[in-house]
Image (tube, rainbow, N blue to C red):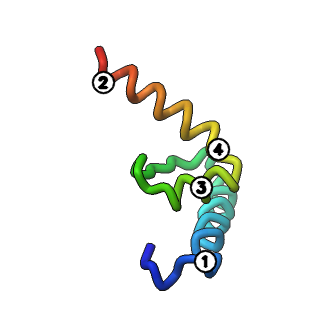
């Protein structure tokens, strides 16, 4: 996201719209990709409650790369 949009709840609006759209399309999950060094995004996802899922997938990905 552009720096000019930081702190203006744009991320929250996009997130809310994605969840609403998925619900309207009867989808049971959303796939989220985030760069592990994007601390601003990681903080946002932690606030939305997605942090535990990100941590799980991150751990799984690290383990799969070792194989």
Q: CA distance from mark 4 to mark 3?
A: 24 Å
Q: CA distance from mark 4 to mark 1?
A: 29 Å
Q: Is residue 20 left or right of residue 40?
A: right
Tell me which label, 1 or 3, sits earlier in the chain: 1
Q: Secondary structure at mark 3?
A: helix
Give the CA distance from mark 2 to mark 1. 35 Å
Q: First in sequence: mark 3 or mark 2?
A: 3
Please report the residue visible at 35 percent of the width from the left and 21 percent of the height from the top: 64
**Position of 66 relative to 19 (above/below):** above
Q: Which residue is mark 1?
A: 7
Give neighbour class at mark 1: few <14, some 14-19, many 20+ (Cα, 10 Å).
Answer: few
Of tags 2 and 1, which is closer to the observer? Answer: 1
Q: Is residue 17 left or right of residue 57?
A: right
The dot on residue 65 is 2
Q: Earlier in the sequence, mark 2 or mark 4?
A: 4
For label 3, the residue is 43
Q: Residue at x 54, y 53 (%)?
A: 42
> In the displayed structure, would residue 13 be above or below residue 42?
below
Judging from the image, what secondary structure is the residue with disc 1 in?
loop
Label 4 or label 3, whichever comes before in sequence order: 4
Tag 4 and tag 3, C-beta contact below 8 Å: no
Residue carrying label 4: 28
């Amino acid at each position: 996201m552009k720096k000019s949009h930081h702190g203006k709840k744009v991320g929250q609006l996009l997130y809310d719209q994605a969840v609403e759209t998925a619900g309207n399309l009867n989808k049971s999950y959303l796939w989220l990709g985030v760069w592990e060094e994007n601390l601003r995004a990681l903080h946002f996802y932690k606030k939305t409650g997605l942090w535990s899922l990100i941590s799980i997938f991150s751990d799984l990905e690290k383990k799969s790369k070792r194989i």
